[in-house]
Every structure is written in structure tokens, then in C-alpha cells.
Amino acid sequence: MKHVKAFCVCFLALVLVFQAGCSSSSTSSDDVITLSFWDFHSDSQKDFFEKLVKDYNASQDRVKIEFKSFNQSDYGTTKLPVAFANGEGPDIFMVNPGDFLKFAEAGILADLDEYFPEGAKEDFLPASLDAVTYEDKILALPYELELLALFYNKDMLADAGLEVPKTWDELSDAAEKLTTEDVAGLILPTDKATYLNFVWYPFLWQQGGSVLTDDGKASNFDSPEVVKALDYWGSFFQNSYSPSKLQNGPWEIGHVGNETAAMQIVGTWDVPALEREYPDVPIEVAPIPIPEGGTHATAAGGYKFAVNSNSEHVEEAAKFVMWAFADDPDRALEWCTDVKFAYSPRKSVIEQGEETYNSGIPKMFTDEIYETAIPEPSFNAKTVDTIGTALQEVMFGNVSGKDAAKKAHDVINESLGN
């Protein structure tokens, strides 16, 4: 499950154009409906979706899906928003949790509730469907739950005389001692984006903190828990334990895999790469360290399948989405355990994949991390952007957590109409 940057195109303009625009679906003269499907996957993950589309096209003769995959960095920042703003959005696409509310509020997501196969909704974890429900409508299909953890080079820690860090203080100490001219102590995301927020949330949740009040109607961003989480996060950059420029994406395990970093907070999606690309590098996984008196927490992210509500063929697009991940569990199991490693939001798939989920590195996630997972929250566009700004200020702006939190608190409250 990888995240992309927040939208850079004004959503108000997008909505106005969207309401009058059209999707890219078409119907040919022989009544075959052609639907466009966009995503951002690469390598074996792209191969999976190409085969998925090929199999579906071969399974019936009424609908033809045309699949296109874009560079991940461009997908959410330019390709999708520009296409929708021009009334040329795809019929089927992927949306991440950080951007879900923006799409929902813009009216771009079709209601999928009526298209679930009989009995399928009961197979999904209720929290996974709650996360894609807006105004009592299920506006996307969850198909993966991706959990964050601390990935580390066991030999680097041992050579430095360090135990696997379990607390914030131990993580800071390890990052300091492992940082050299050639090796970064700890890799964290650097760019302002939904992924940056995603990785930071566990540090807030470990203290029982939250971005908004319990009723979701006001900001809680000036709370002591937010201030502490901001200051702690910023300290890694202020002390140069975490680099401000990255050679690979912050979601790629290549930093630790290529031994240019000792530790990295990334997710389950990188587990297959350890065996496939870095079999000789002693990489292991542990829960994200917690503050004194805190409790373990990790974020459960993962992209969702969505249908363009302005498509001329919503029903046909929705049927493909359901066929892909709400029907035969073998497809969902292949995605979550063969192509990548993630937890399925479907109980039947977890049961069918029991052997995978309880062996090797996945066993660490299953035994010690899975039950601490909190779904990645969806906030309005202004709140998402403001959280990112606060993080950037403590990372690179020499701003205290208290000052960054207070400034963001006021902006978030204003965006909520307070």
C-alpha cells in the first residue's frame, strides 16, 4: 500500500468542471462498452492488474477494460486531478485514504453499495467499510490493509552494541549512533504529502492523541499529545539523524536494503522485496517504538478501488470492481500474499491465507502489530494540507511543536467552520 501526494489542483474548480464534464468511457458500434482503469502500480503489481483486466475481458464479451498505470509520484498530484478537472477522469481508479474525503466531498465517487455480491459485505471487516462510507454511502471498495512497522538492519544494530529500540528514547539513541557519512540512522518521509501524515499518525496515537475532537467537529491539534509528537518527529531532522533528501521513495525498502540506512519506518508492502531483492541483507521487523507510558499503535492504510460517479457506465464499472476483490477470494488472496504482503479486509481471505500470515516476517505483523492497527483517517483537504505544513515546519523551519500546533489548530478550526 503506497501513498501519493495530496492534490495540487483546486477542488472547487474540479467540482464545477466535473459536474458538467464526462468520463472517458465509450460504447463502440458493436455495443461493447469500453471502460478506462487507471492506477500507479509497477513491476509485479502492475503485472497482476494487467492479468486481472485480461482475465475479466476474456470472461465476458460486453465490457472491455483498458488499463493504464502511471508513475506513482505523478498519479495523485497531477494525473488524476488534471483529468477530473478536464472532465476526462477514468471510469475506474485507485484512491488512497488520505485523499478519500476530498473525492467524496467533490462528488466524484460512485455509490457501490448495491453492487456487492450477495453476502459479500458481511465478509468485510466493519471498520474497513466504515472507512469508505460517506453520508451513508459506500463510495469505494477496500482491498488491502497495509501496516507500518520499524524495519532495521540487525547486523548494524549489533555492531553498534544496540538492542532493537522499543521506546522513543531508544529509537533516538539508535538513530544517532547509527548515523554516519554513508549511512542514515532512520529513514522517514520528507516531502509534504499524505504519506508523510500517514507515517506520523502512530506517534500521535501512541499517546492517545488525535487531530480532531471525538465528535470530529473541532480541532484538537493544540493538545499536548500533538505538540509532543511534532517535536519528536522534528528532532530526527533537526539533529540530522534522518536525511532531508532521499535517493528512493520513502515507501521503498531500498534504503535499508541497499544498506544506506540502518532503520526505516515502512509497511507490509515491502515484505516481499526483502526475500526477492535483498535476501542476503539481515533485515528484520519490529513494532514502532512508543513513548514512556504510551501504548503500541500503527496505521492501517491501503488503496481503495473507486468508480467515477460521472461515468456513463457506473454499473459495468462497479461490477468489474466487485468481481476483482469482492467475489472469488483467490484473487484477493493472491494480491495480499503472493504479489505483495498485506492484510485483506475480508475475513474469509485471512482464514484462507493463515499459513502465510503465521510464518516468517509476516508472523511478527500478525502476532504483535495487527491488533494495534488504527485505520488511516480521512480529513478535509485543508486539514490534510495543514498537518503536512506543521510537520514541515518542525522538520525544516526551526519551529517548535507548540508553535506549529497552535498555528495549525487555528487553520483547521477555520476549515471546519469554527
Image (tube, rainbow, N blue to C red):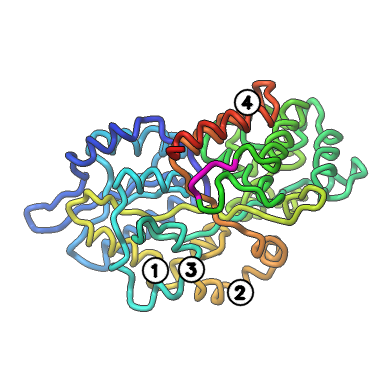
Residue 281: x and y in percent read 75, 48
Name the one closer to the observer, 263 or 225: 225
Which callout, 2 or 3, points at the residue further toward the start of the chain? 3
Instruction: State the CA–CA distance, disc 1 to disc 3.
Output: 14 Å
Q: Three-letter amino acid code at disc 1?
A: Ala
Q: Is residue 276 visible?
A: no
Question: Can you identify the residue that label 4 sits on?
Answer: 393
Secondary structure, mark 2, is helix
Q: Which residues are magenta?
A: 216-220
Residue 134: x and y in percent read 38, 55
Which residue is located at x 60 percent, y 52 percent?
A: 299
Q: Three-letter amino acid code at disc 4?
A: Glu
Name the one closer to the observer, 376 or 350: 376
Which callout, 2 or 4, points at the residue further toward the start of the chain? 2
CB within 8 Å, label 4 to label 1: no
Q: Three-letter amino acid code at disc 3?
A: Pro
Which residue is located at x 55 percent, y 53 percent?
A: 214
Question: Can you identify the residue that label 1 sits on?
Answer: 326
Tell me: residue 389, above or below residue 321: above
Q: Residues within 10 Å of mark 3 (few under 14, many from 20)?
A: few
Which callout, 4 or 3, points at the residue further toward the start of the chain? 3
- Count the numbered circles shown: 4
Tell me: residue 223, above or below residue 49: above
Instruction: State the CA–CA distance, disc 2 to disc 3.
Output: 20 Å
Q: Residues within 10 Å of mark 2 (few under 14, many from 20)?
A: few
Question: Can you identify the residue that label 2 sits on?
Answer: 354
As drawn, the residue found furthest toward the left would be: 29
Question: Can you identify the residue that label 3 sits on?
Answer: 126
